[in-house]
Image (cartoon, helix red, strand yellow):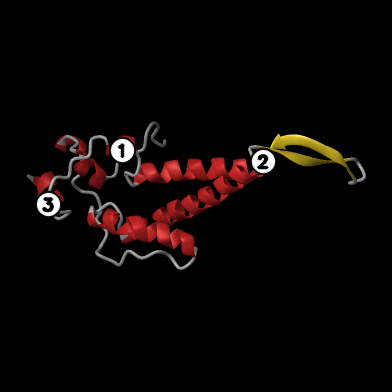
Amino acid sequence: MGTTGRPKKPTQLAVLHGDRKDRINANTPKPSELTVEPPSWLGEQAVEVWQHLAPDLKAKGVLTAWDCEAFAAWCDAVVRRRHASKQVQTHGEVIELPVFNKNGEQTGYRLGKNPWQQILDAADAQMQKYAARFGLTPSDRAGLSIGEASHDADDDLLTG
């Protein structure tokens, strides 16, 4: 059977958040020091988002080579959200949608939800999901206390 409830907090975030030692898994697999680069499929604007946050996340030990695809998905969602938001701002949340008869002929218009609003909502949901995993939301940072510790010092926190 699978587990239920909230997903377990990543060890690195648990350490940074100051969780109790008995709640931190000291045996979490650690990625090697591979390069943390945006994947080649990531669009230009999403790469700009990546370059804005990735260095800090890597320095804190939250972004590793194992996390690149998930973080890239978050960056991509940021760009889709921005684009969809502009479309909703330009055209409104409610727009005129064409109405067709059984023969496929347009017979008029009706008011309806802007399809860009659905794209905006989906991008928001994806952003929130991934943002929490990387500690990018205010609630995930609320207990954050990293002081002057480097990410090498986190090993001392787990063992000492």
Q: Secondary structure at mark 1?
A: helix
Q: Nearer the viewer, residue 39 or 142?
A: 142
Residue furthest to the top: 5
Q: Nearer the viewer, residue 19 or 83?
A: 83
Give the residue displayed 37% in from the left and 41% down from the top: 132
- Of labels 2 and 1, the one closer to you: 2
Query: In the rendered picture of this protein, how many numbered marks are placed on residues?
Result: 3
Whichever of labels 2 and 1 marks the residue nearer the N terminus, that label is 2
At label 3, which amino acid type do we have?
Ala
- The residue wearing badge 2 is 114
Classify mark 3: residues with Cα within 10 Å, few (<14), some (14-19) or many (20+).
few
Classify mark 2: residues with Cα within 10 Å, few (<14), some (14-19) or many (20+).
some
Which label sits on residue 140? Answer: 1
Residue furthest to the right: 103
Q: Is residue 70 left or right of residue 56?
A: right
Classify mark 1: residues with Cα within 10 Å, few (<14), some (14-19) or many (20+).
some
Residue 9 screen position, x and y as percent: 30, 40
- Of labels 3 and 2, the one closer to you: 2
Residue 93 screen position, x and y as percent: 63, 37
Q: Is residue 150 left or right of residue 61?
A: left
Whichever of labels 1 and 3 marks the residue nearer the N terminus, that label is 1
Q: Secondary structure at mark 2?
A: loop
Give the residue displayed 25% in from the left and 44% down from the top: 13
Decide if residue 67 is in sight here: yes
Decide if residue 42 is in sight here: no
Which label sits on residue 153? Answer: 3
Q: CA separation, marks 2 and 1? A: 32 Å
Q: CA separation, marks 1 and 3? A: 21 Å
Q: CA separation, marks 3 and 2? A: 50 Å
Q: Secondary structure at mark 3?
A: helix
Give the residue displayed 50% in from the left and 63% down from the top: 43
Give the residue displayed 38% in from the left and 35% down from the top: 3
